[in-house]
Amino acid sequence: MGTQKDRVKFNVGGRVFETTSTTIANAGRDSIFGAMFDDNWNLLSDNSIEHFIDRNPDCFAVLLDLLRTGELYIPPNIPEKLLYREAMFYGLIDHVRSEKWGPFDGNRLRLSKSIQGQAPGDATAIRAGPDGGVCVVHGSMVHVYDWVLDEYPPLNLDYQRVNDVGWVDSENIVMGVSEKLGRGDGGMGLFNSHTGELRYKFHVCHENQVKSYTAGALSFSSDYKIFSSCKGRSNEYGVGVWDQVTGKQIDFFYEPLGWSLGDADKLQWLEGSNCLLVATMFPRKDNCYISLLDFREKNMVWCWSDMGAPATIAVDEKRVRDAIAMEDNNYICVVNEFEDLGFMDLRMSASTSIRWSSRSRLMKGKMPEEPCYPKLARHGGQLLSSMNDCISVFCGPEWVLTSRLRRSYGGSICDFSIGGDRLFALHSEENVFDIWETPTPPII
């Protein structure tokens, strides 16, 4: 990038602004200004010319100040959504987004907004998008919101139950759907998140025939693979793998005898070891199954289940509600209905018991008054767990409780998700979801 100090004039909606090519270069090549300069950010035309842009001058002043200082200040007289619309026109929305909130920090999160859903019935799942948008599952409907939390037309799958949703990018989502008995219309599809258009369906082939199936939990890898638990009518039970770009099935891990992969409600791809965590938890099944699958060797390299003699399996271990692999620490973290955190060392045999952490116990052995299904998530060096109407944040090598995010309106949290440096918490009872953001440091 050049350091030219050439003056540049813009006439925006009748107001003249003067700046330098160095300031405009901060917008980046993908902005509307990129075509006005050469590779060294030298102006391609006479710098005495006023470049007319028929847009809002007040918003342009805010965005120009952002390019000059790297700080975002929105005056009270400018509606935020108007500024976001103008930023999208200039190709500066990523600049605005990065200054709107700071890097994700669970201990500094502040409640930004709560949104009342429009669909009848309770919501069941929430998934954050890569750019700070979100989608919410209500039975057969999926409601999608962009990062300014404007809702797109809802996706209605004609009374087919949506089991899981995953973001491919900010414009496309994948949905796993239950098969209707005798109709063969379940499975998994790629949809445009803006319009609801079905781009294509992902098929399962068994013995050279396309089979109907129910798609459950989803997971994605950095090399554009999609994983889904699959439950079919013959013996196509297990975990399928598809190419995200072509939509073609590229692999399938069939369910071992006595195990439970097709019913899995949690998948997690581990980039470092090229393995997939597959977990089926209570109360979806009477017994909990957790395993690591190596697709290269077609092998289950680690597994654990709470099936066993009552004398050897503790009651707490029969109440495992969620699991997450801590790949860099070589263990799997689980949580039970008391919000006890437990850890299983992946370097030990599969018969190892769970080491429960006394430092993370919050409920003191007291059963919740209503059914509660805690969830786990990890972001950076922090571990987060939902319980009742709050989310707990754990930090440090011993995962000590450091803060709690509480929001009483809406009842218990049934699911939460992190994406775009935001945390979304879904309260199923009142069909409400909360948006938590990390505030930016104050301007000195």
Image (spheres, rainbow, N blue to C red):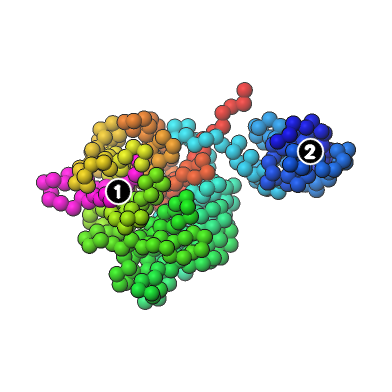
Label drawn at residue 42: 2
Q: Secondary structure at mark 1?
A: strand
User: Magenta residues, as a range?
Assistant: 301-326
Q: Name the residue rendered at 71%, 48% in the picture.
A: 89
Query: Dot 2: few (<14), some (14–19), or many (≥20) neighbours within 10 Å?
Result: some
Label drawn at residue 321: 1
Query: Dot 1: few (<14), some (14–19), or many (≥20) neighbours within 10 Å?
Result: many
Q: Name the residue rendered at 28%, 31% in the picture.
A: 359
- How far apart are labels 2 and 1 at the CA level? 59 Å
Q: Find residue 60 and report its horizontal and vertical position in percent.
A: 74, 40
User: Looking at the picture, which amino acid does disc 2 mark?
Assistant: Asn
Query: Does the magenta portion include 356?
Result: no
Res. 86 in view = no
Q: Look at the image and tell me in which quarter the C terminus lies.
A: top right
Vertical placement of residue 109 versus 369, above or below: above
User: Looking at the picture, which amino acid does disc 1 mark?
Assistant: Arg
Q: Find residue 329 and report its horizontal and vertical position in percent.
A: 34, 37
